[in-house]
Image: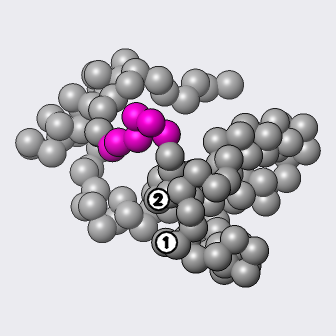
Amino acid sequence: MLKFFAHNLWRWKCGLKEISLATEKCKSITVLYKCQWSPLFEKYMRNRLALGYFRYGSLRTQAKGKYSNLKSIRQRLDLYQKTGNDEILVDIANLAMVEFVNGNHPKKHFKSIDDGIHTEKN
């Protein structure tokens, strides 16, 4: 019951419709981890990261601030909007991870919050 309440609490906060306990069975975190992931996307990310090792060096040893990850993400997002090529989404994800690991934003930090920005339906 507590899991159900917590799940709906999140939905209420996001402005989503409440899920009825009678119609929705709560899934375990293990099941969620499996169904909320794309192994193919991860495979493509890892393949490109391995190639990136030869171009840019090890993810852990790249010099902070040497590359403009955020600028590259913006450029690739524009390119994806023009072309629809999924490979570009993989590049964006990898660049986001590189920024996460090696970013040099002056206010860089991690704080889990609900910023109120959610994906809209088409």
Q: Residues within 10 Å of mark 2 (few under 14, many from 20)?
A: few
Q: Is 108 included in the stretch rendered in magenta? A: yes
Q: CA distance from mark 1 to mark 2?
A: 7 Å
Q: Position of residue 79 (x, y in %)?
A: 85, 42
The residue that appears at 58% across and 51% down in the rendered structure is 65
From the viewer's perspective, tell me whether residue 47 is left or right of residue 27: right
Residue type at mark 2?
Answer: Val
Spot the residue most to the top: 15
Residue type at mark 1?
Answer: Arg
Nearer to the camera, 50 or 31: 50
> Exactly how many numbered labels are in the figure?
2
Question: Is the residue 70 above or below the residue 100 in the image?
Answer: above
The residue that appears at 78% across and 45% down in the rendered structure is 76
The residue that appears at 79% across and 40% down in the rendered structure is 75
Residues tagged 1 and 2 counted as in contact (Cβ below 8 A): yes
Nearer to the camera, 27 or 43: 43
From the viewer's perspective, tell me whether residue 39 is left or right of residue 7: right
Q: Which mark is residue 60?
A: 1
Q: In terms of secondary structure, what is the magenta stretch mainly?
A: loop
Q: Which residues are magenta?
A: 105-110
Q: Name the residue that disc number 2 marks.
A: 101
Q: Tell me the quarter of the picture where residue 62 sits.
A: bottom right
Mark 1 or mark 2, earlier in chain: 1
